[in-house]
Amino acid sequence: MMNSRSCICVSAMKPYCRFLISFRSSSISGFSPPSSAKLLNSSKLQCRKIDSRSIRSGTQCRRIVLDRKAFCDSDSISWGGGSRVLRARVSIGRGRGRGRERGVLVIPRVASDFRNHSTSSLGSHVNSDQSFESIFVKPLVFKELEKTEEIPKKESGKGGEDAKSGNVGVRSEKEQVLSQSEAEKEAWKLLRGAVVNYCGFPVGTVAANDPGDKQTLNYDQVFIRDFVPSAYAFLLDGEGEIVRNFLLHTLQLQSWEKTVDCHSPGPGLMPASFKVKPVPLEGNDGSFEEVLDADFGESAIGRVSPVDSGLWWIILLRAYGKLTGDYTLQERIDVQTGIKLILKLCLADGFDMFPTLLVTDGSCMIDRRMGIHGHPLEIQALFYSALRCAREMLNVNDGTKNLVAAVNNRLSALSFHIREYYWVDIKKINEIYRYNTEEYSADATNKFNIYPDQIPSWLVGWIPNQGGYFIGNLQPAHMDFRFFTLGNLWAVISSLGNQEQNEGVMTLIEEKWGDLVANMPLKICFPALEQDEWRIITGSDPKNTPWSYHNGGSWPTLLWQFTLACIKVGKLELAKKAVAVAEKRLKEDEWPEYYDTRSGRFVGKQSRLYQTWTIAGFLASKKLIEQPEKASLLFWQEDYQLLETCVCGLSKSSARKNKCSRFTPPRS
Ligand code: GLC
């Protein structure tokens, strides 16, 4: 059993290298926290700089990277009093105290038999797996790096194995720059200017670089979800280092335990954002150390938990492999452990009756109250995508085969559930309009007891004859009929929907261009909540007034995901049309975060300018349009094997008898 007490300890080995570590005591590992461990209520990763003026020159700034694989392989570890420690000596080659032994890192050795303990006894219900406890504390080792590890070099736009098969890289870099529009040139400059370094190495991009911003809030941080379009733009431009660094550093942050009012979320939680903070060293001689300070939602407005961060991390990890051909990253034991921890958190059994993830309001891109608590489509689509990625990347062995089975079962159940219950088109709405209610039985048609009066008046006139979409949320007696763009796009990209549905979503966007694109792609959701609905559902949020921000605002960052979905369904021209709409205004408007009004005519009233994911989303779209063959590495087709799997384990004939809803006869 896990001992729930946990803490963060700082190596007492002063003065040159400190590292903050979180650990839990575990009877499996036999580890208990050292009495001298200093307890801190913070989660920080530190890298000490001796001289602020020589960040890259010389060797004063050392990056210290956790290498869990090496830890597993290492035998030279001991911990005073029966526990085990790793001692890593760090010496500084230049400057003060040159040649002296600079520091000793002390790390509890836990889960040392990680490979044996990993997911060996995982069933389709991951909660039953006691062995997962052993990876609660990740095996860690510090490896000092002078420079970033070797990754495949940029070859005039070529990616790795997979990318090469797409016959890319035919245009030279010079040709590419020459063909760039002024907007693109400026965007690349701004994107590179948004790069955040940690000890001299690029690890992410800042959310916004608005020079006129008087209240930065947390827009000076690297957000996990915001970095994704930056990463895609860099990767599609043949640049992998920053993405690799980002993936590894955020993985380290996952190791840290966070507490909000004495309660800790699961250890697989990835932060919403992090910041590189310079911290002056004692002595006031200008020396400082850099600290990676993560926010898991405990500082965020509304204290929202970033459920999407871990899902995005997995999605990005796969994209990195696909576009660089560097699969060594995803094969590393620490990275495999990171994937498992995220899956553990998502696949944990709860009270839920449905395969969809139950989350609080604000747990994704819409990170304020907008009435999306429960089973919002955005999270379900990212969850499905992340599961598909994880299934491709997990090393399958005796230790993981049950986890892989659990992933497969969930994929199958999730796609069935969403395809069946979230999909609406004119035919389905017509059906809901005539639903019987209060059906008490296992074979009810109206399983969620939806009252037909719930069909909103806007929808009756809005739903086109062609196409359809996945609704925003489904709860008992409640269908949220709003159209949420990100969730629908990822349903298409990941083939969460079936082929007809995926094409139907893109048809609907085309049909409803005036509502969903108009003057700026794309509406975050449609329509806006107004009057009483706005007051009750948003809590009278002045930032989310009708047709602004999350409440029906237009977000140019959604463009890259739209482009990917368009390419998938063979509508490249539609993507080009949307990019052209954006390109006309973004540079002139100084790259706003979002636009207001029903048709997206005005720059958002509280919108940041020079918002990085606006810039990156535009660039990633341009790159995808230039190289649609690379796009095909980033989406999924239908998996027919999954369709065969009935989670109930019942065959078609017995399922009918046993009321497996999957096999209920199609609606007439
Ligand atoms: C806002 C957005 C969120 C984004 C953050 C940083 O809070 O709602 O999705 O990650 O800004 O840009």
Image (spheres, grey):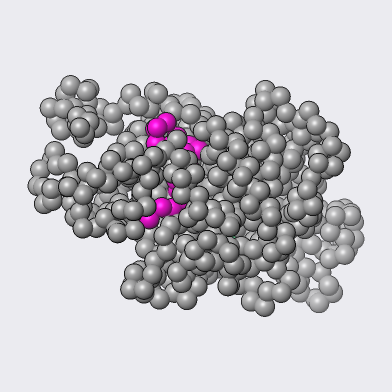
Q: Nearer the viewer, residue 389 or 16?
A: 389
Of the pair 309 and 333, the residue shown nearer to us: 309
Residue visible at 70% across and 36% down in the picture: 626
Q: Residue 543 at what x, y percent from top left?
A: 50, 73
Span shown in magenta: 481-502
Q: Quadrant of the C terminus?
A: top left
At a point 51% along the width and 33% down the height, the residue shown is 569
- Residue 572 falls inside the magenta stretch: no
Q: Give the x, y percent position of residue 363.
A: 45, 58
Q: Is residue 271 left or right of residue 613?
A: left
Of residues 637 and 184, the one nearer the viewer is 184
Q: Quadrant of residue 19?
A: bottom right
Residue found 47% across the figure and 32% down from its top = 391
Q: Is residue 205 left or right of residue 551?
A: right
Does residue 303 appear anywhere in the picture? no
Q: Please tell me which residue lies in front, 425 or 142.
A: 425
